């Protein structure tokens, strides 16, 4: 029997419904209450939603004060999300409104700050000291790659809680239009003005000294070129270790790679610092006596700190113009990358000699020259700064005697930095007590040195009372400043006169050999004593080599020298040295050369282009070896200029071709890839262009001109290789465009190793093929002007058409009416533009009528058929920037006039025309407009001479390493 529920009355049913509804409402209320109380949010701190409560969760200290308490009954999680998002949004908007000067202001407060962590100060110092040791590797061959070292340094600094005050993105934003760049020493330096504040941005440049040092152990030029980044990394660590008021402030740094580049966003390692006021003998002469004493005391305090630094004694290597600068009336050391850690190593006392101060005696203790760094630092500071600051004391007998005695002690390095600081402090106290005027005195802000290093106490008294002594001293200072400026101008004029004198002398030298007694070289301090017999383009290859201690190789005595004077002095000091070879054609001008010492001259010199041999002995019979008639010294200069012998030129060409093979291959590969011929060698393309038949044409090229006799046609070649099947046939005979001009430009381009002209080859279009080519009537109408029917065909060229990926580029290279005062190293885009312009200048080409065509900054000369149409064109203003491709410079030197005749070129033009003649043209056909072969040769040689003279002058002013890239 089924169970049946009793029937309920309607009122009872209604009551049950209301009861269930009440339970549901109560459940919803309880759930809502729990959410409101935060009990369902275990990850968030909980607190009572009471406006009277003072407890709040600390979400982020810098944002906490911006988050209001939520009203009662509002979901806490949602409220916090809204508040945080709103606060971050406001903060982001505010950051966008900040100027770059605000970034710098804030950066100074947080750069290199040690974050609070569990690392003890002693452990931190040990780890920083370890980093410094890694940045001074004993063997560069086993040193870490710069990229790897940068990553390790960045990670270690973060682990130590040491951070930059500016991010890399913030630093990149500092590159403004009101900045200018230059290469100072071995670094790029960008100076940027922000209102009344100027900052400097330092990054890695071309550090040739470090490169040479590296290549002694690891002959890898590409790897060694990037090791300049080690110096930037050293500075970052030194700024973290050295805490002293005499060391400049670091605003920020960026460590993102080893790239060496002049463009801000492409720089690898960067330092940002405020710029200060230069200190030199001109500015020193304008300081008051008290100010000079104060600055001298602070410099001595800095030396004392370096002697007892947290990582031991530190030595300065040299001083340049802006190594110490004034910041807020305080002299500070700016460059920290060349410190010597620890005193000089030694085995005996004689090795412990201070350069330029040999009378100073130091002891060799435990393999170290005890006190070497302190003495050498004192000498550098005294010689560059202090001796000028103490040069004109006031007319006070007692003070003058004290200064005189102190100067004597400083010259003899017989006094410590602390002792000098104390003496100067007494002088300053005495000067103030006599109320010698002191303008704009700095307030004492000395901080105690670290690790127990004491600082001299300076008693500075404010005084505004003027005395007659000060008037006289100020007048003395003005007189000294005027004398120094006058002497500087005289020295400058002397240097310029020397350069002109040397250039005139070079133009008169038409002899292969010459006796060197006391020649006039660019270096005004350079003199030669004794007699050396010079033989140009010669060497003792493979013989007379001997091993010396300073050699960078094991098979002989090979060194790097910076001048002919240095090379001669090295040979004079070595009793074994009877001759030396410099691998340079102009050793009196070049700034960095390889020198090989020889221990005998008992043989005849062998031809070796690019080398210059210097032998001790009698010019008529050096070392007892007779010199043949061709090697005799011709002391009577020739009135004309002659080209070097064909043998000499061929030998030079071969040497340069072998030396630059890798560079040429790289340039060719880049050009072919940009022309849509990636993976195809130029020689293969030329062979196909000469041999494959022309099946059809599609009309005139985009580079053609309507008024031209003949034309330039897009053609299809037979074959199944699409990249090679497209070409252009060029046969033009004026009035402005000539295919011969294109061919000459092409050979000039390849001879110099530039690779900015498309591959071009000769192509004889036979009669049968000419009439068989399919296409519109322009083919026959235009090319029939070459008298095809009456001759054997059309002698023209095949070249590569403009690929679709190429477009018009901007030419941004600056023109300068005079040679620059400071060289700015070109970036890759600027170098490409300069080489493109070089072809114009050498061929007197008209400006391209279809714009500057290229791809990614690589300009290609598609309109070289406009060559030799503007003979009066002068483009030397582009080369006044003092930047020039090294590969081109070396090749151009092969074609100089005989006898090392300055910058004159005599055989380049003939070389190029010979290459054209070898392709089937006759001498009568070598004609462009009114210019015949002899005129074309003269135009090329003349243009090359003009360019080379500018480059040589730049090298004489700034050095080979700075000018050539």
Image: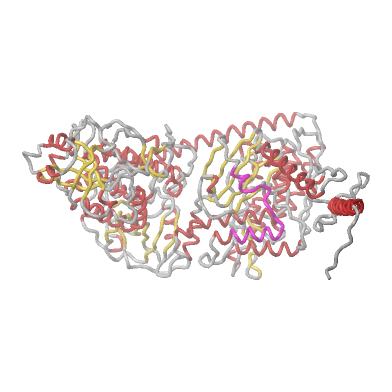
Image quadrant occupied by the N terminus? bottom right
Q: Residue 922 in the image: x percent, y percent?
A: 13, 43
With respect to residue 94, does 665 lie above or below? Answer: below
Magenta stretch secondary structure, dominant:
helix
* Residue depicted at x 32% and y 52%: 677
Q: How many marks?
A: 0
Instruction: Locate residue 785: give its quadrant.
Output: top left
Tell whether 562 sits left or right of 144.
left
Residue at the outermost front position: 1
On the question of residue 760 being in view, the answer is yes
Q: Nearer the viewer, residue 290 or 431?
A: 290
Q: How is the image coloured?
A: secondary structure
Q: Nearer the viewer, residue 881 or 80?
A: 80
Q: Residue 432 in the image: x percent, y percent?
A: 80, 37
Instruction: Locate residue 20: give its quadrant.
Output: bottom right
Q: Does the stretch in magenta take in 166? A: yes
Residue at the outermost right position: 52
Tell whether 577 sits left or right of 192.
left
Q: Residue 558 in the image: x percent, y percent?
A: 42, 63
On the question of residue 955 being in view, the answer is no
Q: Nearer the viewer, residue 336 or 504?
A: 336
With respect to residue 276, does 681 lie above or below? Answer: below
Q: Nearer the viewer, residue 746 or 683?
A: 683
Q: Residue 654 in the image: x percent, y percent?
A: 27, 57
Magenta extent: 150-172
Instruction: Locate residue 647: give its quadrant.
Output: bottom left
Tell whether 554 sits left or right of 644.
right
Q: Does the stretch in magenta take in 627? A: no
């Amino acid at each position: 029997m089924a169970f049946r529920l009793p029937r309920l009355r309607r009122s009872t049913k209604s009551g049950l419904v209301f009861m269930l509804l009440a339970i549901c409402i109560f459940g919803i209320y309880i759930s809502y209450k729990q959410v409101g109380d935060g009990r369902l949010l275990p990850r968030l701190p909980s607190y009572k939603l009471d406006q009277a409560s003072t407890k709040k969760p600390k979400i982020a200290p810098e944002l906490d004060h911006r988050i209001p308490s939520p009203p009662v009954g509002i979901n806490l999680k949602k409220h916090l999300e809204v508040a945080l998002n709103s606060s971050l949004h406001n903060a982001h908007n505010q950051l966008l409104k900040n100027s770059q000067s605000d970034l710098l202001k804030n950066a100074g407060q947080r750069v290199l700050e040690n974050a609070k962590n569990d690392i003890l100060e002693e452990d931190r110092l040990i780890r920083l000291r370890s980093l410094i040791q890694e940045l001074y590797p004993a063997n560069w061959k086993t040193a870490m790659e710069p990229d790897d070292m940068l990553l390790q340094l960045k990670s270690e600094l973060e682990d130590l809680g040491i951070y930059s005050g500016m991010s890399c993105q913030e630093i990149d934003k500092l590159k403004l239009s009101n900045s200018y760049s230059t290469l100072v020493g071995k670094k790029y330096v960008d100076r940027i003005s922000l209102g009344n504040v100027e900052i400097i941005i330092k990054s890695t440049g071309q550090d040739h000294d470090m490169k040479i040092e590296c290549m002694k152990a690891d002959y890898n030029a590409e790897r060694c070129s990037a090791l300049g980044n080690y110096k930037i990394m050293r500075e970052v660590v030194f700024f973290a270790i050295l805490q002293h008021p005499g060391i400049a402030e670091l605003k920020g740094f960026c460590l993102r790679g080893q790239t060496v580049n002049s463009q801000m966003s492409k720089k690898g390692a960067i330092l940002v610092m405020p710029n200060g006021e230069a200190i030199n003998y001109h500015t020193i002469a304008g300081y008051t006596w008290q100010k000079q004493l104060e600055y001298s005391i602070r410099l001595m305090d800095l030396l004392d700190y370096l002697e007892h630094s947290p990582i031991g004694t530190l030595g300065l290597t040299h001083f340049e113009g802006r190594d110490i600068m004034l910041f807020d009336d305080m002299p500070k050391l700016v460059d920290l990358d060349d410190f010597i850690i620890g005193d000089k190593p030694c085995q005996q006392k004689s090795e412990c000699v201070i350069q330029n101060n040999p009378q100073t005696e130091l002891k060799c203790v435990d393999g170290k020259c005890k006190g070497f760094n302190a003495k050498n630092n004192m000498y550098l500071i005294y010689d560059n700064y202090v001796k000028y600051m103490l040069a004109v004391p006031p007319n006070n007998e007692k003070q003058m005697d004290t200064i005189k005695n102190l100067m004597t002690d400083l010259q003899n390095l017989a006094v410590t930095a602390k002792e000098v600081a104390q003496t100067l402090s007494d002088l300053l106290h005495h000067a103030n007590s006599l109320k010698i005027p002191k303008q704009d005195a700095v307030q004492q802000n000395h901080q105690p040195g670290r690790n127990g290093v004491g600082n001299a106490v300076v008693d500075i008294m404010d005084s505004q009372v003027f005395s007659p002594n000060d008037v006289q001293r100020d007048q003395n200072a003005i007189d000294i400043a005027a004398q120094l400026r006058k002497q500087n101008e005289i020295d400058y004029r002397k240097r310029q006169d020397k350069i002109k004198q040397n250039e005139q002398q070079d133009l008169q030298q038409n002899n292969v050999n010459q006796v060197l007694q006391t020649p006039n070289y660019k270096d005004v301090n350079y003199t030669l004593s004794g007699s050396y017999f010079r033989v140009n383009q010669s060497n003792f290859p493979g013989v007379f080599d001997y091993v010396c201690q300073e050699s960078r190789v094991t098979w002989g005595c090979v060194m790097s020298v910076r001048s002919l004077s240095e090379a001669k002095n090295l040979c004079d000091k070595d009793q074994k040295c009877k001759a030396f070879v410099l691998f340079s054609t102009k050793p009196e001008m070049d700034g960095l050369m390889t020198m090989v010492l020889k221990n005998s001259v008992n043989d005849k010199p062998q031809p070796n282009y690019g080398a210059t041999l210097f032998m001790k002995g009698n010019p008529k019979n050096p070392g007892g070896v007779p010199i043949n008639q061709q090697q005799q010294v011709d002391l009577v200069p020739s009135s004309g200029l002659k080209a070097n012998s064909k043998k000499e030129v061929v030998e030079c060409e071969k040497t340069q071709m072998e030396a630059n093979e890798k560079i040429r291959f790289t340039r060719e590969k880049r050009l072919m890839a940009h022309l849509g011929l990636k993976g195809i060698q130029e020689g293969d393309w030329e062979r196909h262009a000469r041999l494959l038949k022309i099946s059809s044409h599609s009309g005139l090229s985009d580079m053609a001109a309507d008024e031209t006799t003949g034309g330039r046609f897009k053609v299809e070649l037979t074959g199944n290789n699409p990249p090679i099947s497209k070409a252009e046939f060029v046969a033009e005979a004026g009035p402005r465009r000539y295919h011969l001009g294109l061919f000459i430009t092409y050979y000039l381009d390849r001879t110099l190793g530039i690779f900015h002209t498309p591959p071009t080859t000769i192509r004889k279009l036979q009669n049968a093929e000419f009439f068989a080519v399919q296409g519109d009537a322009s083919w026959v109408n235009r090319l029939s002007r070459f008298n095809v029917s009456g001759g054997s065909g059309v002698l023209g060229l095949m070249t590569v058409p403009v690929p679709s990926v190429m477009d018009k580029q901007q030419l941004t290279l600056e023109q300068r009416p005079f040679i620059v005062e400071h060289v700015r190293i070109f970036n890759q885009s600027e170098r490409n533009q300069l080489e493109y312009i070089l072809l114009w200048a050498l061929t007197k080409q008209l400006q391209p009528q279809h714009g500057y065509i290229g791809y990614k900054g690589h300009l290609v000369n598609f309109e070289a058929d406009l060559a030799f149409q503007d003979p009066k064109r002068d483009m030397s203003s582009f080369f006044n920037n003092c930047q020039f491709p090294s590969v081109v410079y070396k090749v151009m030197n092969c074609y100089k006039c005989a006898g090392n005749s300055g910058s004159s070129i005599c055989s380049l033009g003939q070389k190029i025309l010979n290459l054209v003649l070898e392709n089937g043209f006759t001498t009568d056909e070598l004609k462009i407009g009114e210019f015949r072969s002899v005129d074309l040769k003269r135009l090329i040689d003349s243009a090359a001479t003009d360019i080379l003279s500018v480059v040589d002058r730049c090298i004489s002013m700034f050095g080979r390493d700075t000018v050539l890239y």
